[in-house]
Image (spheres, helix red, strand yellow):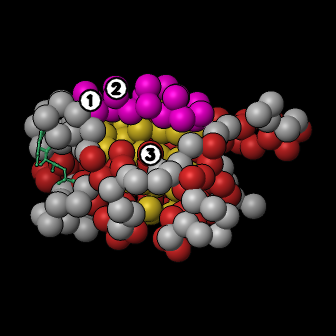
Amino acid sequence: MADHILVLYGSYRSDRAGIRLAHYTTRNLCARGFEAELIDAKAIGLPMLDRMYKEYPSGQAPAAMETLAGKIRQADGFVFVTGEYNWGMQPGLKNLTDHFLEEWFWRPAGIVSYSAGRIGGARASLMWHGTLSEMGMVVISSTVTVGTITRTLSTEGQPIGEGGKALETSFVRFADDLAWWTEAARLQRERKQPPY
Ligand SMILES: Cc1cc2nc3c(=O)[nH]c(=O)nc-3n(C[C@H](O)[C@H](O)[C@H](O)COP(=O)(O)O)c2cc1C
């Protein structure tokens, strides 16, 4: 059975551009043999963090949170598609992520970042590294950084021009890296119960 990857994206802006990259990522992971599913924080619409999922009495978390908790527990790996606001993380994605903790443990995570400028969201990518490690994920070393997002992907998420070519090249290595770690973590979870 194909490894199941959740692709998480969290811009709430009406004119958001990163959704192009979220669709590109999901589609290309599926083409690579994963079973990938887009988790769009705006569509899920969790509230601003009040109680974490685990702080609700069993069966009383909001339905969207309960469903998402199940998907996170079942996933074999994660890809965080992140833009950059004022050198920082996008609050919608961080808010969704913070609702969970143990649900994320013992799986690899990859980071795909983007921005309107040329730096490609690298500063937000760096921040996510520490956060995802703290949340029990093993962050793979390959990253994808996409600058000038609207000139690299069409509104349908198709690569354009030189930037699009560079994305296609870097995505292959990223997906190979993710596949290796996803398989390794799955085999280890099957072989040995995580220590906590
Ligand atoms: C509030 C805000 C802050 C931004 N700060 C940065 C930044 O620090 N660095 C950067 O490269 N781009 C920055 N940008 C431009 C974004 O990279 C660009 O708007 C991108 O499309 C945002 O992602 P989204 O369209 O998926 O929301 C900022 C945009 C917004 C709306």
Real-space Cα distance between discs 1 and 3? 21 Å
* Label 1 close to label 2 by CB (< 8 Å): yes
Residues rendered magenta in the picture: 122-141
How many labels were placed on the picture? 3
Real-space Cα distance between discs 1 and 2? 6 Å
Residue at 54% x, 35% y: name it.
135
Q: Dot 1 surroundings within 10 Å: few (below 14), some, or many (20 or more)?
A: many
Residue at 12% x, 64% y: name it.
15
Inspect the magenta stretch and tell me whether residue 131 lies in it.
yes
Tag 1: amino acid: Ala
Residue named by callout 2: 126
Image coords of residue 140 (percent x, y): 53, 30
Image coords of residue 136 (percent x, y): 59, 33
Residue named by callout 3: 98
Q: Residue furthest right?
A: 191
Real-space Cα distance between discs 2 and 3? 17 Å
Image coords of residue 54 (percent x, y): 60, 52
